[in-house]
Image (tube, rainbow, N blue to C red):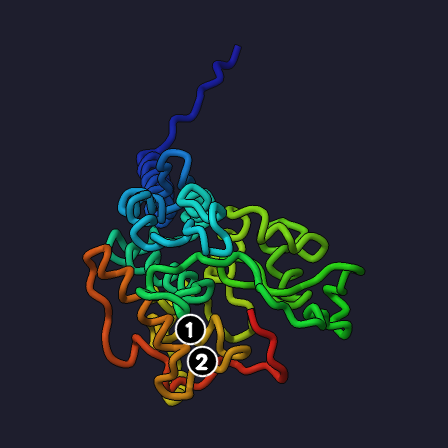
Amino acid sequence: MKRITRAHPSERAIKWSKAAAFVLVAMLAAAEARREKACDTGWECSGSRFCCNGTITDYFKAHHFEEFFPRRNDSIAHAAGFWTYQAFIAAAALFEPRGFGTTSGKVTGIKEVAAFLGHVGARISCGKFYPNPLAWGLCYNREMSPDQSYYCDDSNELYRCVEGVRYYGRGAIPVYWNYNYGIIGKGINQDLLSHPELLEQNATIAFEAAIWRWMTPVKRRQPSAHDVFVGNWKPTKRDTVSKRYPGFGATMNIMYGDGYHICGRGFTDEMNVIISHYIYYLDLMGVNHESGRSLDCADQAVFNPSTKSSGS
């Protein structure tokens, strides 16, 4: 019987096999290195590289919230008992994995929280009626004397007005008009078009809607307030010519550029009040603010202006 002999691999084939295995291991290692590191930080932040920077509760405590808004539960405040630290933290936790208050370390986080709450504190303050105006943030949760049109735009076919529903200003950064309730409601998975009253009934949802607006570009060719503040946005030549620079000033341009005519009009009282709240909150946190052209929007042209004013 003829013996069958098994061929042995040549030395060259063995070398090629080892080389291929080494290349495969190297490719896998490189792919792993390119993959973003994800961290979990308690219940607040998980599955994101931003969570590796810690969470808002690491540096912003309940006593800071009380220092920011000491008169919010005063007997003459119109939303006494509504706004709480717990509601803010619960809403913020939903956006920490996207970088809200968790981008680029503690100092940037403090500045962003102060910037966001600076907008909130200024927009729903009743401080102009009382001494120490910066202490009266979170005084309201709804518009007190709404326009009798109830902010219904019948021409908007995507977010049609619901019969009997009124779309006056509500929330931490007040939302007006049916289409804005529709857009923001879709963004936070709440039917605000049918139930806009949620923004004056649930403080967590009210903060969530405001943070979504801060974190999300709502117009084409326009960044988010978050991106212009933390440095993710790089201005183009057109932006520079229009005097739009990264920083707090540009957040006012994005949040109110169309509807409130705050930017590009010099140092108006409306703009200065928002800046004052931001600086005041930073002072309470022991952090210095930026200066110069990044702090205000006095000379900035509006980002991608709409054909009609819409408000927030």
Element on which disc 2 rests: loop
Element on which disc 1 rests: helix
Q: Residue at x 72, y 64 (%)?
A: 159
Image side of residue 116 versus residue 178, left or right: left
Q: Residue at x 35, y 84 (%)?
A: 267
Front in this rendered view, residue 71 or 2: 71
Q: Residue at x 32, y 43 (%)?
A: 62
The quadrant in which residue 242 appears is: bottom left
The quadrant in which residue 186 appears is: bottom right
Residue 238 position (above or below residue 15): below
What label sits on residue 262 in the rendered view? 2
The residue at which mark 1 appears reads as 252
Q: Are the two marked residues, 1 and 2, in contact with CB atoms closer than 8 angstroms?
A: yes
Image side of residue 177 versus residue 63, left or right: right
Residue type, mark 2 in image? Ile
Residue 34 location in percent, x, y?
A: 36, 50
